[in-house]
C-alpha cells in the first residue's frame, strides 16, 4: 500500500563492521535494499551492478556463469578460476574466495552494499579496488514472509519465497527458496543442441537464530544452490592483424582460417548461431556459517566461522562455428574455511575494532581442450612434418593444477571524535599468505586421416609453450592501512578525505591456456599489487531530508598492478604500474510526496604503463579493460493512491555505459560500443498483502557486446551479447 513520503528513507549499512546510517560513513558506498532488488526484478549479480555508478561488470562465459565486478576500472580481467579478484565479494561478511562462487542467485536479501576504493583494513583480503557485500534477510521474533511467482517471454518461470518467525521466546527461524528456469535467447541452428542463454537455478537457505539473553546471540546458516544451464554462445567475427604490433581489427566480411563467416548462418543476427558443440555449465555450491555475538556493556565480541564448497563443470564450443576446431572443458572444485574473531567498542568519542582472521582454501582444475589447427594461414603450424597441404593438425591439451592457500591476518581500526565536528580514523592490517601450486599440462597429437604421426603422440613436456611440470611456492607479508579525516560543518553534511593502501597477494598463472602462453616458467608466477588511493568526498542531506547529494573524487597509484594479457590462445597475468582517477555523484530526491528520483554518474580515466602487445616488440601505455569513461543511471518512481486499499506505482529506469575496451591491449577489435538501456515496471497494489507487477526490461531491445576475446592464433574474435528485451508478470504475496 502506498504511503505518501515526507522525507527520503534512511539507509543503514555495515561498511565499517557495525550498523550506521549511510550518510554518516566517510566511504563511497552505494546500497540497495532487498525490496528494491525484488521490485526491479533482479535475478543475478550483473543485474544489480547496472545501478551502481562507476561500476562495469561482465560474465566471462556469458549469462549463467560467474560474474566479474569492475569498480573504477579495477577488476579481474582474467577468466581463470584459480585467481582472486581485486573487488572482493562477501555474503554476510563471509569472503567468497573462488570466482565461480560469485555466480550465486539473489534471493531473500536484506540489502546489498558496494564500497569503492581499497577496503584492506576491516574487510581485508585483496580488496584493492573495493568490495560487494550481500546481506541476507535474518530470522526475527515476528512471523513474516513472502511468495512470488513470475512468468515471462522465453518461457521464463521464477518462484521465490521466504518464511520465518519464532520457534520459542529465544529461538527464531527463516527459510528461503528459489527456482528460476528460462529458455535460451540465442537460437542454435544445430538441431541437436539447445539454445543458449538459459536460466536454470535452484537454491535453498535455512537460518536459526538463538538469543538466550539480551547480551548474546548465535546465528546458524546453511545454503545450497545449483545451476544447470546452457550459457550464451559466442558470435565469431574474423579479424585482420597488424604485422608489426600484432593488434587486431574487425573484418566482418572476411573468414576465419577454415573459410567460415558468421553471416553464413542467421544472416548476421547476433541471437542466431550454429555450433558443432554445446555450451553447458553445471555448478553446485554448499555454504555453512556460524555467527556468535556477545555484548559486554560498551564492548562486543564477534566470532564468524564459515565454510564453502563449489564444484563446476563448464564445456564450450570455443570456435563458435559449425566446424570442429576448438572444444574445451573446465571441471573445477574448491572448498575453503574461514574464521574471524574480533572485539570492539562502538560508543563514545573513541570507537575501535580489533581482530584476527584465518583462511584455508584448496582448489583444483583439470581443463582439457582439442584444437584442430591448420597447416597454413592464421595459426598455422610448421608444415615440415610432411602432412598433406590443407590438413588440420589436431592437438589435444590437458591440464591438472592444484593450489593450496593459507592466510593469517591481524587488524585494527580506530575512530576518534577529537572535536564536535571532527573525527580521525586510522586502520591497519597485517596479512601473511602462503600458496603451494602444482601444474602438470600435456599436449598430444591425435590421429587423423593422412597423418604420418602415431596416434596420441605426446609432445615433449618441456617443449616450447609447455613449461611442465611446474611447482611453485608463494610466501609473503602484506600490509594495508587507512588514514582519514571527517568534518561535519553542519547537520546533515559530511566532508571526508582519506589516503589508504590496499594490497593483493601474488599467485600463479594456472591451466594449460596460461602454460601455452608462457614462453618460460618465469612467467607463471606473478607478484603482489599495491594501490595507494587518495579520496575526497561529501555526503549532504537538504530540504528536510528530501534531497541527498553524495559525491567523491579519487586518484589511484598502482604499483605492480596485476594485468591480464591475452596471447595466442591463452593469457597471462603480469605486473605493470598503473594509475586511475575520476569521481562519482549520486542524487536522491523526493520531488513530490509521490514522485522520487535517483541519479548516478561517474567519470573515469585509467592508464596501464608499458603493456606488451601481442607482438613483443610493441610496448605502449593502455587503458584498463572494462573501464568506461562515463557511466550513468537513473530511476524515477511515481506512486498513485487509487483508494480502497489499491495503489499504482509507475517506475522507469535507465543505465548508460560509454565505450571501453575488452582487453588491456586495447585492440581496435576489442572496443565495445557504448549503450543506453531502459526498463519499465508497473506495480498494482491489491490491498495490504498482494501486488501484481508488469515489467519490460531493455525496452528498445538494445544489442550490445558484453564480452570479447581475441584469438590471434585462430584468426577470429569472439563476442558475447547481453540479453535482448524481456517482459513478463510477477504476482507477490507478503505477510
Image (cartoon, rainbow, N blue to C red):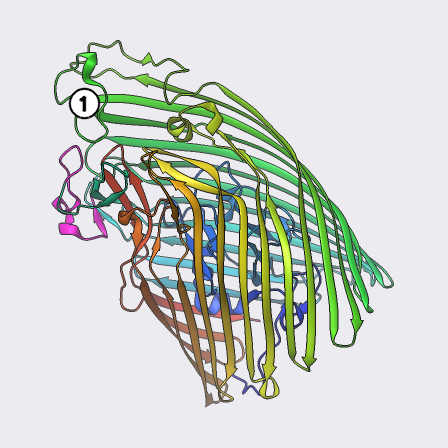
Residue occupying image coordinates x 34% and y 32%: 328
Residue 733 or residue 467, whichever sits in front? 467
| Tag 1 secondary structure | loop
What range of the chain is rendered magenta? 255-273
Rendered residue at 65%/80% (across/down) = 492
The reply, left or right, for residue 340 in relation to residue 654 is: right
Say which of 7 and 476 sits in front.
476
Q: Position of residue 586 (x, y in %)?
A: 51, 72
Q: From where the camera sits, is residue 528 visible?
A: yes
Left/right placement of residue 711 relative to residue 415 reads left
Count numbered badges in the picture: 1
- State whether residue 215 is above or below residue 444: below
Towards the viewer: 454 or 305: 454
Rendered position, 451 above or below 659: above
Q: How crowded is the residue under tag 1: few (<14 C-alpha within 10 Å), some, or many (20+)? A: many
**Is residue 307 within the magenta segment?**
no
The answer to which image quadrant residue 618 occupies is: top left
The C terminus - image quarter: bottom right
Residue linked to disc 1: 375
Q: Residue at the location (48% across, 45% down)?
A: 226
Q: Along the line of sight, which residue is nearer the eye, 9 or 151?
A: 9
- Percent x, y of residue 65: 42, 46
Residue 139 position in % (x across, y down): 67, 61
In percent of width and height, residue 660 lies at 35, 56
Amino acid at each position: 500500500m502506498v504511503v505518501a513520503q515526507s522525507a527520503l528513507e534512511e539507509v543503514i549499512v555495515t561498511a565499517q563492521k557495525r550498523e550506521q546510517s549511510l550518510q554518516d560513513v566517510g566511504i563511497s558506498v552505494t546500497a540497495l535494499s532487498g525490496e528494491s532488488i525484488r521490485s526491479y526484478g533482479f535475478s543475478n549479480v550483473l543485474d544489480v551492478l547496472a545501478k551502481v555508478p562507476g561500476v562495469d561488470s561482465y560474465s566471462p562465459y556469458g549469462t549463467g556463469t560467474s560474474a566479474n565486478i569492475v569498480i573504477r576500472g579495477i577488476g579481474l580481467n582474467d577468466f581463470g578460476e584459480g585467481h582472486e579478484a581485486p573487488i572482493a565479494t562477501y555474503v554476510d561478511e563471509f569472503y567468497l574466495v573462488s570466482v565461480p562462487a560469485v555466480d550465486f542467485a539473489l534471493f531473500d536479501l536484506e540489502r546489498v552494499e558496494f564500497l569503492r576504493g581499497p577496503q584492506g583494513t576491516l574487510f581485508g583480503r585483496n580488496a584493492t579496488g573495493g568490495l560487494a557485500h550481500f546481506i541476507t534477510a535474518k530470522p526475527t521474533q515476528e512471523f513474516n514472509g513472502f511468495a512470488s511467482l513470475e512468468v515471462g517471454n522465453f518461457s521464463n518461470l521464477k518462484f521465490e519465497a521466504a518464511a520465518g518467525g519464532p520457534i520459542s521466546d529465544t529461538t527464531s527461524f527463516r527459510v528461503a527458496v528459489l527456482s528460476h528456469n528460462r529458455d535460451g535467447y540465442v537460437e542454435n541452428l544445430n538441431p541437436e543442441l539447445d539454445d543458449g542463454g538459459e536460466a536454470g537455478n535452484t537454491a535453498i537457505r535455512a537460518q536459526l537464530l538463538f538469543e538466550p539473553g539480551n547480551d548474546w546471540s548465535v546465528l546458524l546458516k546453511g545454503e545450497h544452490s545449483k545451476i544447470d544451464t546452457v550459457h550464451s554462445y559466442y558470435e565469431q567475427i574474423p579479424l585482420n592483424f597488424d604485422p608489426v604490433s600484432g593488434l587486431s581489427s574487425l573484418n566482418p566480411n572476411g573468414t576465419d582460417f577454415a573459410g567460415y563467416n558468421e553471416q553464413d548462418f542467421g544472416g548476421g543476427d547476433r541471437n542466431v548461431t550454429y555450433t558443432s558443440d554445446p555450451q553447458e555449465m553445471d555448478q553446485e555450491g554448499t555454504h555453512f556459517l556460524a555467527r556468535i555475538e556477545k555484548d559486554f556493556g560498551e564492548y562486543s565480541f564477534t566470532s564468524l566461522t564459515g565454510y564453502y564448497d563449489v564444484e563446476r563443470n563448464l564445456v564450450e564450443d570455443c570456435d563458435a562455428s559449425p566446424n570442429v576446431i576448438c572444444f574445451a572443458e573446465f571441471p573445477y572444485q574448491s572448498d575453503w574455511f574461514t574464521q574471524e574473531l574480533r572485539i570492539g567498542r562502538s560508543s563514545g568519542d573513541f570507537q575501535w575494532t580489533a581482530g584476527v582472521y584465518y583462511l584455508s582454501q584448496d582448489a583444483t582444475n583439470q581443463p582439457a581442450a582439442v584444437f584442430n589447427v591448420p597447416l597454413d594461414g592464421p595459426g598455422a603450424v610448421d608444415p615440415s612434418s610432411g602432412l598433406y597441404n590443407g590438413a588440420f593438425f589436431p592437438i589435444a591439451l590437458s591440464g591438472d593444477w592444484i593450489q593450496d592457500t593459507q592466510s593469517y591476518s591481524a587488524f585494527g581500526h580506530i575512530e576518534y571524535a577529537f572535536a564536535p565536528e571532527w573525527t580521525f580514523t586510522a586502520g591497519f592490517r597485517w596479512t601473511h599468505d602462503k600458496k603451494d601450486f602444482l601444474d602438470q599440462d600435456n599436449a598430444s597429437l591425435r590421429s587423423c586421416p593422412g597423418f604420418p604421426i602415431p596416434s596420441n603422440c605426446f609432445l615433449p613436456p618441456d617443449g616450447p609453450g609447455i613449461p611442465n611440470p611446474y611447482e611453485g611456492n608463494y610466501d609473503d607479508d602484506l600490509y594495508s592501512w587507512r588514514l582519514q579525516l571527517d568534518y561535519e560543518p553542519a547537520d546533515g553534511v559530511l566532508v571526508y578525505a582519506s589516503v589508504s593502501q590496499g594490497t593483493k597477494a601474488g599467485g600463479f598463472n594456472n591451466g594449460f591456456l596460461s602454460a601455452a602462453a608462457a614462453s618460460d616458467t618465469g612467467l607463471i608466477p606473478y607478484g603482489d599489487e599495491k594501490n595507494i588511493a587518495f579520496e575526497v568526498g561529501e555526503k549532504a542531506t537538504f530540504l528536510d531530508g528530501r534531497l541527498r547529494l553524495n559525491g567523491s573524487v579519487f586518484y589511484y597509484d598502482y604499483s605492480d598492478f596485476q594485468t591480464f594479457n591475452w596471447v595466442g590462445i591463452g593469457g597471462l597475468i603480469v605486473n605493470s604500474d598503473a594509475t586511475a582517477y575520476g569521481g562519482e555523484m549520486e542524487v536522491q530526491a523526493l520531488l513530490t510526496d509521490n514522485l522520487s528520483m535517483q541519479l548516478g554518474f561517474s567519470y573515469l580515466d585509467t592508464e596501464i604503463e608499458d603493456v606488451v602487445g601481442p607482438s613483443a616488440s610493441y610496448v605502449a601505455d593502455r587503458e584498463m579493460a572494462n573501464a568506461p569513461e562515463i557511466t550513468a543511471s537513473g530511476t524515477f518512481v511515481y506512486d498513485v493512491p487509487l483508494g480502497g486499499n489499491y495503489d499504482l506505482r509507475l517506475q522507469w529506469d535507465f543505465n548508460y555505459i560509454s565505450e571501453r575496451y575488452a582487453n588491456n591491449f586495447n585492440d581496435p577489435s576489442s572496443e565495445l560500443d557504448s549503450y543506453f538501456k531502459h526498463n519499465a515496471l508497473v506495480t498494482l497494489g491489491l490491498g495490504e498483502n498482494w501486488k501484481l507487477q508488469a515489467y519490460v526490461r531493455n525496452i528498445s531491445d538494445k544489442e550490445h557486446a558484453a564480452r570479447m576475446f581475441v584469438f590471434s592464433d585462430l584468426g577470429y574474435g569472439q563476442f558475447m551479447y547481453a540479453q535482448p528485451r524481456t517482459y513478463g508478470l510477477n504476482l507477490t504475496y507478503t505477510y
